[in-house]
Image (cartoon, rainbow, N blue to C red):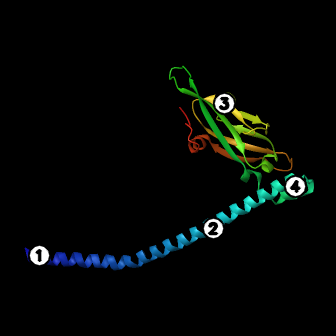
Amino acid sequence: MVWVQIPLILASLGFYAWVWFSLRPLLHQRQQLKAEIEEGTRGLNLTRAEYAAQRSKVAELQSIIERFGDPQLAELARRVSPPVVEQITPQASSRPLGYNGGPWNQPLYAYHVWVAGPTWALNQIARVKYEFPPRFQKPVQISDERDGTEPFMVKYSGWNCVVVGVTLELVDPKEKPQQIALDMCASLTAKGQKPSG
């Protein structure tokens, strides 16, 4: 019986050795690819950081130009600045209102949606159009109020947050409207607010 097992053990060892030597080049290639990907990622992160630093410098220069009030400088700054849509971030907030008292007695929330960004970018916006799901009483809401801490804000009451289409209509009629999507649930969760009932 032992004599039968020895050839099987030797055959198994031979097979494993063959697999090991066959896979060694693949493992080496995998390690090389992993190193290349890590190097590329470091380069990409550096490029992102440089881009963010440049955007920050442009925003700072534009705010300085706005303080001087020179229309020619402001126009020049507008032409070299990044698109408004890159400077604007849609925001959402919620606060509990109680319960709706319906058959499911779900909690109601007051939701606010607005856009945030640097003053120079907000000043280029004429109005903001918010597109809610069709089941809403007012599926399209428009705001042209840029004053306050929540510029171009709209409100609704309901029991859940939604994804909202946000269209920025600019002051310059030659500029096309710019669109952004807002995932209200993600925005509220990031702020530590309860996104829905």
Front residue of 68 and 111? 68
Measure the C-alpha gap from mark 4 to mark 1: 90 Å
User: In this figure, which residue is indicated by the disc labeled 4?
Assistant: 74
Measure the C-alpha gap from mark 2 to mark 1: 62 Å
Measure the C-alpha gap from mark 2 to mark 4: 30 Å
Q: Earlier in the sequence, mark 3 or mark 4?
A: 4
Please identify the residue farthest to the left as the structure is shown. Answer: 1
Amino acid type for the residue under numbered disc 2: Leu
Q: Residue 191 at what x, y percent from top left?
A: 59, 43
Q: Earlier in the sequence, mark 2 or mark 1?
A: 1
Q: Residue 36 at what x, y percent from top left?
A: 53, 73
Amino acid type for the residue under numbered disc 4: Ala
User: In this figure, which residue is indicated by the disc labeled 1?
Assistant: 4
**Relative to 63, is 7 above or below?**
below
Screen quadrant of the N terminus: bottom left
Are the residues tagged 3 and 1 within 8 Å (C-beta)?
no
User: In this figure, which residue is indicated by the disc labeled 2?
Assistant: 46
Q: Is residue 35 visible?
A: yes
Amino acid type for the residue under numbered disc 3: Tyr
Q: Nearer the viewer, mark 3 or mark 4?
A: 4
Front residue of 136 and 36? 36
Graded by Cα atoms within 10 Å as few (under 14), some (14 to 19) or many (20 or more), the crowding at tag 4 reads some
Query: Hey, which quadrant is residue 42 in on the image?
Result: bottom right
